Image (cartoon, rainbow, N blue to C red):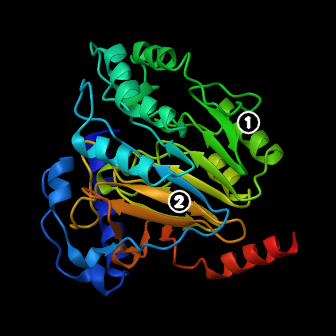
Amino acid sequence: MNRIVRLLLIILMAAILWACQKTGDDKSEQPQPTVIADESQAAAEVAAPDRYLPVPDLPQAPDTIRIAVISDINGSYGTVGYSPLVRNAVSDIVERKVDFVVSPGDLVAGQMQGLDYDAMWKGFHYQIGDVFFDNDLEFIFAPGNHDASSYPGHETERAAYARAFEKRQPRAPLLMGSQFPFYYGVKIRDILVIALDINRPIKDNDPQLDWLETTLETQASTRLNIVLGHLPLSPINLSQFVEVAGSPRLLSILRKTPSTMYISGHHHIYYPGHIGELRTVSAPALGNGPRGLFGAPPIAGYVIIEVPPHSPARVTSLVAPDFKRMVDIESLPRSIVRIEREDVGMAEYIMEMLDDKARQ
């Protein structure tokens, strides 16, 4: 794409996103603090009180499944190890006694030739993966562009990624046709979790989409199907608006399967939404480069998904540094390009879903 066309596209997207912002509620129209440098600790120190709420200390509903989502935990290129913020989040997740953990990727700081990938993956296992394992927490993840880039020239790091998990498969049995650790699926209790290899835009004829379609049809969950892909289905961050999954077939497959949620990372912005009846979650970054929406402060944190047996899943983002506050959903724009905020336009669909579950 030449520079002129790219510039025109950026101008067009800026106009669209500006219009989206103006459709938000009064909070999104209030003057916002200036965006600061993309550093996790700096982001944690910035607080806009009207955008955050205390995490309610409510008793957990019986038989509710709780899932933690961490994303983009890597530091700068080649970093071995993790920031205190990431390690604190891991400790907080363990203390909250969630049922399992998922990630849409960017677990290490790769995507550059000459880096010590084996050392980075050893650091990941020691500080992140083994902590979850030792606390009996299943950890299901999709490859990010810094983990196993599928662009030409990154074959060595994809090999290192595969090597890093040769002896570290999930405890839960892999579903038929899985190509672990690139794309695969497991069933944990009655939640279906699928990880896809979408660290660059994919085509409709990608073989993993055939597998995805078959798996969703034959392994239907009684509660929720979680599909992990590093790239979002639609732009969340203006500067990355072309870095999306890009496959109309992928969206069609996901939308035709009831009770499915697509979780992405890469854009480093928290935004729970939906495209029609398909729920989506853009996860915030825990590591380097958290971002905010339309001039709001960057949000570093992780997500908790609560899945009761007979009602829709509840999505919450816990905010760094202490994870005792959560994002006020009404402080977020009502829509971003084609994704609507999760509480906008979903009432009719949720009522239909509850009626369907009551008949079962």
Q: Is residue 299 left or right of residue 181?
A: left
Q: Is residue 135 left or right of residue 4?
A: right
The kind of residue tagged 1 is: Asp
Marker disc for residue 305: 2
**Mark 1 in CB contact with mark 2 (< 8 angstroms):** no
Residue occupying image coordinates x 38% and y 81%: 23
Label 2 SS: strand
Q: Quadrant of residue 204?
A: top right
Q: How many marks?
A: 2
Image location of residue 337, percent across then percent down: 44, 65
Q: Quadrant of residue 224?
A: bottom right
What is the quadrant of the C terminus in the image?
bottom right
The kind of residue tagged 2 is: Ile
What is the quadrant of the N terminus in the image?
top left
Marker disc for residue 339: none
Q: Is residue 233 above or below residue 204?
A: below
Label 1 SS: helix
Q: Which residue is mark 1?
A: 210
Q: Residue furthest right?
A: 359
Q: CA distance from mark 1 to mark 2?
A: 28 Å
Q: Is residue 151 above or below residue 253?
A: above
Q: Quadrant of residue 212?
A: top right
Q: Is residue 124 above or below residue 212?
A: above
Q: Nearer the viewer, mark 1 or mark 2?
A: 2
Image location of residue 122, percent across then percent down: 37, 19
Residue occupying image coordinates x 62% and y 81%: 347
| Marks 1 and 2, the one that precedes in the sequence | 1
Is there any visible trace of residue 263 in the rendered image? Answer: yes
